[in-house]
Amino acid sequence: MNPRRLTGLTGLFLVLILALPGCATAPSPDGELVLVAGASGRAGRYVIQRLKEQGIPLRAMTRSRADAGQRLGADFAGVDWVECDVRDPAQVAVAMAGVGRVISVIGANTVGDDNSAEFVDYGGVRNLVAAARREQVQHFVLLTAIGVTDPAHPFNKATKGALGWRLKGEDYLRASGLTYTIVRPGGLVNEPAGQKGLRLEQGDNWRPLLRSTLSRDDLALVLIESLSQPGARNVTFELVNDPSLAPGAWRQRFATLTPDPN
C-alpha cells in the first residue's frame, strides 16, 4: 500500500491510527507548536536549526523520516518528525493536530508529473491551509518566490508555469481568513546568516532583483521572526541580501510594510 495514495476509508483509518497515544505529538501549550512543512529540504533544515536554537517547540514534516535522517545528519536529532505527503489531505490533517503556527517551505522539484508545482506548490498549500483553518492556527508563513506575478519571468518559462501555481497558492492563503505572511525570496544560497544586510521590498518588481541572492540561514531567521512581528501580519514581501544594508536592521523594516489589500 502506497501511503501517498491513501484515500477514502483507508485515509480515515490512517487518521484514527496516528491519532492514538504515541503516534502523534500532544498539543503544545498556548499554541506555541510550530509545524515546519518541507522541513527536510534545503531551506527547511535551516528553519529547524534556528527554531531549536530559540527554544521554540516544533514539529517537522517530511515525506520520509529515513531520507530526512540521511540528508540532515545531526540536524535530524532532537526533533519531532512526522511523515506526511503534503498532497494527501488526510495525512496533512494528522500532521496539523495541535499546531499553533505554520512555516511552509515546501517546493516542487519536478515538471510535468504529480510532484510538480500544480500538486505541491498549489495543491499542497491548499491542503495545509485547509487543515490550518480547521485547527484555528494563529499564523501561517508561506515561502514562494520572487516573480510569481509575472508569466514572463524566465523561471516560469523554464518550468512550464511553476510560478503561476505558486501564485495560486498565495491567493488561496490570502483568501483563507488566516493571519499570514508570504515571503518571496531571491535565489537561495548556503551562506551563514548576518554576513550581509537584508532588503525587504513589496510589489514583486523582480527585474532589479533578478541577480540578487539570499542566504537560506538569513531566510530562516526572517520566516521565524515573521511569526511574532505585528508588522508581518497579512503582508507579502520580497527578500534578498543587500551588502549595502546593515545586518540586523531588517527587523525594523517590518513596521513599514504595507498590508495586502482585503
Image: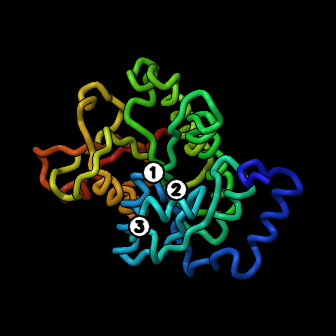
Residue 181: which numbered mark, if any?
Answer: 1
Residue 140: which numbered mark, if any?
Answer: 2
Choose the circle earlier in sequence order: 1 or 3. 3
How far is the residue under mark 2 from the one under mark 3?
28 Å
Q: Secondary structure at mark 3?
A: helix
Disc 3 packing (10 Å; few <14; some 14–19; many ≥20): few
Task: Evaluate whether residue 185 shows in this view.
Answer: yes
In this rendering, the label closer to the viewer, 1 or 3: 3
- Compared across the picture, whether 80 is left or right of 251 comes to right
Choose the circle earlier in sequence order: 2 or 3. 3
- Compared across the picture, whether 82 is left or right of 154 comes to right
Going by the numbered disc 1, the residue's amino acid type is Thr
Task: Tell me how the rendering is colored.
Answer: rainbow
Q: Position of residue 246 (x, y in %)?
A: 12, 53
Location of mark 3 (residue): 73
Going by the numbered disc 3, the residue's amino acid type is Gly
Q: Are discs 2 and 1 less than 8 Å apart at CB?
A: yes
Q: Position of residue 12 (x, y in %)?
A: 84, 60
Give residue 187's quadrant in the image.
top left
Going by the numbered disc 2, the residue's amino acid type is Phe
In this rendering, the label closer to the viewer, 2 or 3: 3
Choose the circle earlier in sequence order: 2 or 1. 2
Q: Position of residue 128 (x, y in %)?
A: 62, 52
Q: Secondary structure at mark 1?
A: strand
> Residue placed at 64% from the left, 41% from the top?
123
Task: Evaluate whether residue 255 shows in this view.
Answer: no
Viewer-nearest residue: 125 or 246: 125
Disc 1 packing (10 Å; few <14; some 14–19; many ≥20): many
> Residue placed at 56% from the left, 63% from the top?
66
Viewer-nearest residue: 4 or 247: 4
